């Protein structure tokens, strides 16, 4: 499997847990950290944790290893590092504060939902 497959797995996981305002950014040539970022948010601590756990569980089921997960206990900004894909799961207020989409505004949005649903 490649990074697009991993991106689809992670995107589906956050979508299935009803994450809001899901955005996938193509970071190739922009960041050395990862090829793709997924940014989304939940409306409660429990939902943020459920979203992050679903990403971790789905990736592991498909044979991917989690490089790192940070912020899970606090549930304000959970970072799930899958290597080529990094998932940022925010609590609503934290997302409004950090504005990662603006920080990485030069990164093109990757259309994932149509390739999954279509």
Image: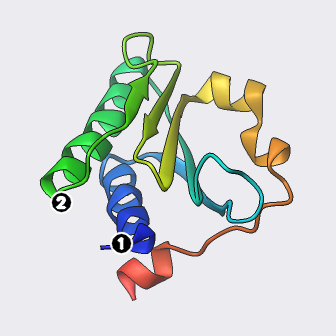
45 lies left or right of 35: left
Task: Report the residue marked by disc 2.
Answer: 62
Q: Are marks 1 and 2 in contact (CB under 8 Å)?
A: yes
The residue positioned 58% from the left and 52% from the top of the image is 34
Vertically, is 66 above or below 14? above
Vertically, is 68 above or below 76? below
98 lies left or right of 110: right
- Give the residue at the far left of this rendering: 61
Identify the mark nearer the N-term, 1 or 2: 1
**Residue 89 percent coordinates (x, y):** 50, 36
Vertically, is 46 above or below 17? above
Task: Report the residue marked by disc 1.
Answer: 5
Does residue 88 show up? yes
Q: Disc 1 versus disc 2: distance between alpha carbons?
A: 10 Å
**Residue 32 percent coordinates (x, y):** 67, 50
77 lies left or right of 106: left
- Give the residue at the far top of this rendering: 74
The residue positioned 39% from the left and 89% from the top of the image is 118
**Residue 13 percent coordinates (x, y):** 31, 53
Vertically, is 69 above or below 21? above
The residue positioned 51% from the left and 46% from the top of the image is 86
Q: Nearer the viewer, residue 47 or 85?
A: 85
Packing grade of label 1 (10 A; few <14, some 14-19, many >=20) is: few
**Residue 5 percent coordinates (x, y):** 36, 72
Tag 2 secondary structure: loop
């Amino acid at each position: 499997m490649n990074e697009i497959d991993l991106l689809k797995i992670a995107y589906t996981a956050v979508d299935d847990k009803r994450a809001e305002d899901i955005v996938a950014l193509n970071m190739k040539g922009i960041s050395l950290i990862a090829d793709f970022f997924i940014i989304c948010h939940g409306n409660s601590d429990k939902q943020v944790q459920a979203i992050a756990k679903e990403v971790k569980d789905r990736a592991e089921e498909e044979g991917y290893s989690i490089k790192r997960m940070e912020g899970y206990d606090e549930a304000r900004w959970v970072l799930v590092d899958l290597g080529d894909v990094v998932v940022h799961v925010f609590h609503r207020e934290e997302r409004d504060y950090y504005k990662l989409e603006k920080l990485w505004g030069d990164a093109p949005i990757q259309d994932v939902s149509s390739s999954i649903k279509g």
